């Protein structure tokens, strides 16, 4: 059980790490505390009010912790905040509710079969709260007395330990003596001994001994001498995922496999046994199931076999709440010849509730961009923000957001700390958005290697594999023009 506790701790540590990433400005769904109505702009979230309201309802359902095996699909055009909303949900959940994110394509790996990868993802998203009652002896050490026999083999000893109300002497065996000397326990330490395992932990030094030594480390922690009985019952609660229990039980080196991630396939007998065991623990009141969230982004990348697995897994007793996201319209379901809405088979669609996102207004784009600029600690002038907003409307929110950091580098080159129109224009002309890239490709398609492996270079059609390196350099350099709508200052509307 100790290994479970350390996994739980490790999980908490991992959540503390953060970087400036695509969604790092998002710290929640931005809801009113009581009514759960989404605020227009809060916690890094802007607009998309209907979808956020729906997400808030799903969030409540997850927090209740009693409903399992439901699925929601967030559907909408690219860069309308689908992943952002899922991240907002993740941020709003306590550290104790498991939230697993996988991308549809991650399921396909050479090491694990698709269904095994999905199984693991599902079981990572189911938390088990395990309650343990342990008996401990907790008190301040009055004296440790160890007698070593002359031959060195046999050790004997006594430990005198007290609380504010009582004092007791315990006879010590060899194992306890070793544990005490390993922890360097001396008189004045407040310690706790787990009666079942004999594990000793130092809680600190007693305040009454604070003036005993003048050479004490700065990190010495002082605690009160415990009160009451020496022997106490303590309840410890660990939160681990079902997957972690699987891994620990699946191999002899199972515990290490958790950290290397190299878990391999877990046999279904192992899982069955664990499910059964957890059922027993639940009946005895030792464990509680806490359904977490499995977020499958880009869910259209899954194929029909995966979808049928999900259908089935949602109906199992221990199931998480599954949130999926897709930007596909009516498209072919992988592994079949038929087309269906969002690329999902109809029988799965029938089981999900659909949250739809829609394109942003200019104002919302502007707010999101300015939040992004703040997150990246970049100062953007009002004019530059207006032009970025316009770019965001005409191309995509993502492209405009990407231009912020690029423009910042350009403005630094001219030794300015503030991004101005010129910097944005320069980065706009240096980096193509998808529309201009498509336009450029169709204008110059002949120069690119096509599906037949043929390219036209220097006016001569050649097989790509036979083109000598020197001739490829002869391709003329192309300059990219800035479209009229945002090229000249006069035509630009920066008043907004
Ligand atoms: N409502 C919003 N408030 C704040 N930031 C947002 C909002 N919507 C999107 N963003 C930000 O815009 C960027 C693109 O959004 P996101 O990645 O969520 O789009 P998506 O809908 O998942 O797109 P795709 O279908 O391409 O995966 C992200 O950096 C995201 O954090
Ligand atoms: Mg996304």
Image (cartoon, rainbow, N blue to C red):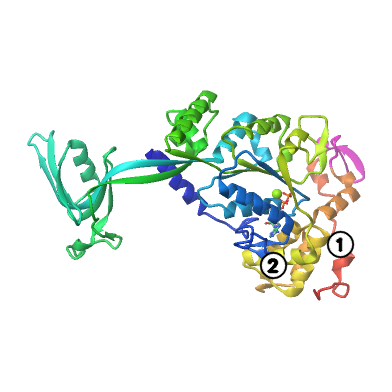
Which of the 4 image quarters holds residue 297?
top right
Q: Position of residue 181 (x, y in %)?
A: 21, 45
Looking at the picture, tell me which residue is in the foreground, 166 or 238: 166
Q: How many other residues sit within 10 Å of disc 2, few (<14), some (14-19) or many (≥20)?
A: many
Judge depth for marks 1 and 2 and give the one in front. 2
Tag 2's secondary structure? helix
Q: How many other residues sit within 10 Å of disc 1, few (<14), some (14-19) or many (≥20)?
A: few
Which of the 4 image quarters holds residue 18?
bottom right
Which residues fall within the magenta stretch? 449-466
Residue under the point 61% across and 58% down: 28
Work out which residue is located at the far top of the displayed protein and give it: 269
Residue 464 belongs to magenta span? yes
Residue 300 belongs to magenta span? no
Can residue 376 be spotted in the picture? no
Residue under the point 58% across and 54% down: 91
Does the closest atom of ligand 1 sit within 8 Å of the Cβ of label 1?
no
Q: Is residue 95 above or below residue 360?
A: above
Q: Which residue is mark 2?
A: 370
Q: Which residue is mark 1?
A: 481
Q: Could you tell me how many numbered marks the image carries?
A: 2
Quarter for ligand 1? bottom right
Q: Position of residue 429 (x, y in %)?
A: 80, 62
Which of the 4 image quarters holds residue 404?
bottom right
Tag 1's secondary structure? loop
Q: On the rendered structure, is 136 left or right of 347?
A: left
Rounded to the nearest angstrom, the CA distance separating label 1 from label 2 is 26 Å
């Amino acid at each position: 059980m100790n290994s479970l506790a350390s996994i739980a701790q490790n999980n908490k540590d991992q959540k503390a790490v953060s970087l400036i990433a695509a969604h790092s400005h998002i710290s929640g769904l931005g809801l009113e505390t009581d009514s759960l109505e989404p605020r227009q702009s809060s916690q890094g979230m802007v607009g998309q009010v209907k979808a956020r309201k729906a997400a808030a309802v799903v969030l409540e359902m997850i927090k209740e912790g009693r409903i399992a095996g439901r699925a929601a699909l967030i559907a909408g055009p690219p860069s309308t905040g689908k992943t952002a909303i899922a991240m907002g949900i993740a941020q709003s959940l306590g550290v104790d509710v498991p939230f697993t994110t996988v991308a549809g394509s991650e399921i396909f790996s050479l090491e694990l079969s698709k269904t095994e990868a999905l199984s693991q993802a599902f079981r990572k998203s189911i938390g088990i709260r395990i309650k343990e009652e342990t008996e401990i002896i907790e008190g301040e050490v009055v004296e440790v007395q160890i007698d070593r026999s002359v031959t060195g083999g046999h050790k004997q000893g006594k430990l005198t330990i007290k609380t504010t109300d009582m004092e007791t002497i315990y006879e010590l065996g060899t194992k306890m003596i070793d544990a005490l000397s390993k922890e360097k326990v001396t008189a004045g330490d407040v310690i706790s001994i787990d009666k079942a395992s004999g594990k000793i932990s130092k809680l600190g030094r007693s305040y009454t001994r604070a003036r005993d030594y003048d050479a004490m480390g700065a990190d010495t922690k002082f605690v009160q001498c415990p009160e009451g009985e020496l022997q106490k019952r303590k309840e410890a609660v660990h939160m681990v995922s079902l997957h972690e229990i699987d891994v620990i039980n699946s191999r002899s080196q199972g515990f290490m496999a958790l950290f290397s991630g190299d878990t391999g396939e877990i046999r279904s007998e192992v899982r069955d046994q664990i499910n059964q065991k957890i059922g027993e623990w639940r009946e005895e009141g030792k464990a509680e199931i806490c359904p977490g969230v499995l977020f499958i982004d880009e869910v259209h990348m899954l194929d029909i076999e995966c979808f049928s697995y999900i259908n089935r897994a949602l109906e199992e007793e221990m199931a998480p709440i599954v949130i999926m996201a897709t930007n596909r319209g009516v498209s072919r379901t992988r592994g079949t010849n038929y087309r269906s809405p969002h690329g999902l088979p109809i029988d799965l669609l029938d089981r999900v509730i659909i949250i739809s996102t829609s394109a942003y207004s200019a104002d919302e784009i502007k707010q999101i961009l300015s939040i992004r600029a703040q997150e990246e600690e970049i100062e953007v002038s009002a004019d530059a923000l207006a032009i970025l907003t316009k770019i965001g409307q005409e191309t995509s929110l993502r492209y405009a957001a990407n231009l912020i950091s690029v423009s910042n580098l350009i403005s630094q080159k001219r030794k300015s700390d503030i991004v101005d129109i010129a910097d944005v224009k320069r980065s706009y002309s240096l980096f193509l958005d998808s529309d201009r890239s498509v336009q450029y490709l169709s204008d110059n398609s002949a120069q690119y290697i096509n599906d037949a492996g043929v390219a036209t270079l220097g006016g001569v059609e050649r097989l790509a594999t036979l083109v000598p390196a020197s001739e490829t350099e002869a391709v003329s350099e192309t300059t990219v023009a800035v479209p009229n709508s945002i090229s000249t200052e006069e035509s630009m509307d920066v008043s907004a």
